[in-house]
Image (cartoon, helix red, strand yellow):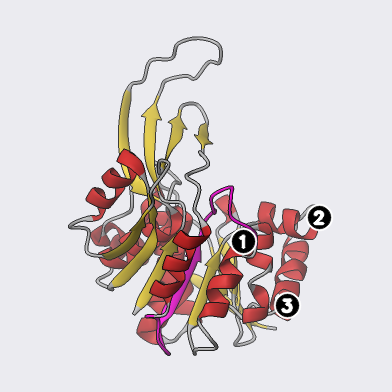
Amino acid sequence: MIFTLTLNPSIDYVVHLDRFESGITNRTTGEEYYIGGKGLNVSFMLAELGIESTAFGFTAGFTGAAIAGGILGKGIRSDFIRLQNGLSRINIKIKAEQESEINCQGPDISESEFIQLLRKVEAIKDGDTIVLAGSIPKTMSDDTYVRILKHLGGKDVRIVVDATKKLLMNCLPYRPFLIKPNRQELSEMFKTTVETAEQTETCARELMKMGARNVIVSLGGQGAVLFAEDGKTYRTGVLKEKVVSTVGSGDSMVAGFIAGYEQKKDYGYALKLGTACGNATAFSAGIAKKEKVMEVLEKITVTEKNN
């Protein structure tokens, strides 16, 4: 079983404008909303690929009720804890000349409520996968993910971490199966500027020395590179198609990689399917449908080299 964790789920409110100008009233040309949060996006993409998952997390207030309702019928199991206070967040995604985001903080989570989550985590067994993805509410500490991993009690669990800064770095001693930073996040973690292929590889290799088994680095318009534990480096490009929205694209890549590896135990194919899922979502409104993923998959190429 695959378990995804979204401590800070959201309603992503997408607004479209011909032009955004600060200091005046802007009128939209269209809007839509999606149930979001990185872990939930992973679950949604897995469901499109026909893979079952269980989503853990927290919801609060009327927005949390909307999130819980929006998950129904999406092909995933949700096992969320209802918080007593606060509101689940609404994130605003502005689509104008440029793509901008305003991500809110989310509700406070008490220690007793967090302990409820730890009890749910006890259901994870040897051979399962847990995906720790996204931000945490402001009241939680940078060791939050580590506390969850410690609570697994040494079980043989495949760990995927898609987070930034200390949230990610603190998890490395637990030898995560996959992490997925981009160059900006590498720059933040290593307090340097990461721009070239050589700098990217140096940072990725250092993360592997610190415990990561496989590292995908997102390269934006240049595709992605996987530094794999089999000793090879795999690369993919991106397809030239109209980008509708990049929201959820990275999460879709994580889901596709997990699904691809589950299917074939092959890192090259895992990256190929992950890239197809990420691209397909970028070309879609919301998380891509399976038909779009399969269409894109046929066009993706992967190169590999031995190190």
Distance in Å between CA atoms under marks 3 and 2 = 16 Å
Q: Nearer the viewer, residue 19 or 294?
A: 19
- The reply to whether residue 97 is visible in this rendering is yes
Most foreground residue, 83 or 236: 83
Q: Which quadrant of the view contains residue 10?
A: top left
In the image, 94 versus 38, the foreground residue is 38
What kind of residue is marked 1?
Pro
Name the residue located 55 percent from the left edge and 15 percent from the top edge. Answer: 22
Q: Which disc is residue 191 wearing?
A: 2
Q: Which residue is mark 3?
A: 210
Say whether disc 3 or disc 2 marks the residue closer to the N-terminus: 2
Residue where numbered disc 1 is placed: 181
Would residue 300 be visible to someone looking at this image? no
Q: Secondary structure at mark 3?
A: loop
Q: Position of residue 270 (x, y in %)?
A: 45, 76
> Contact (CB < 8 A) between labels 3 and 2?
no
The circle on residue 153 is none
Identified at 34% across, 64% down, the residue is 43
- The residue at 38%/27% (across/down) is 16
Q: What type is the residue that disc 2 sits on?
A: Lys
User: Is the residue under label 3 in contact with that under label 1 (CB below 8 Å)?
Assistant: no
Residue 172 versus residue 33 in the image, above or below: below
First in residue order: circle 2 vs circle 1: 1
User: Based on the displayed image, in which of its 4 quarters is residue 121 positioned?
Assistant: bottom left
Q: Quadrant of the C terminus?
A: bottom right
Residue 203's spot in the image, x, y percent? Answer: 75, 67
Q: Which residues are magenta?
A: 123-142
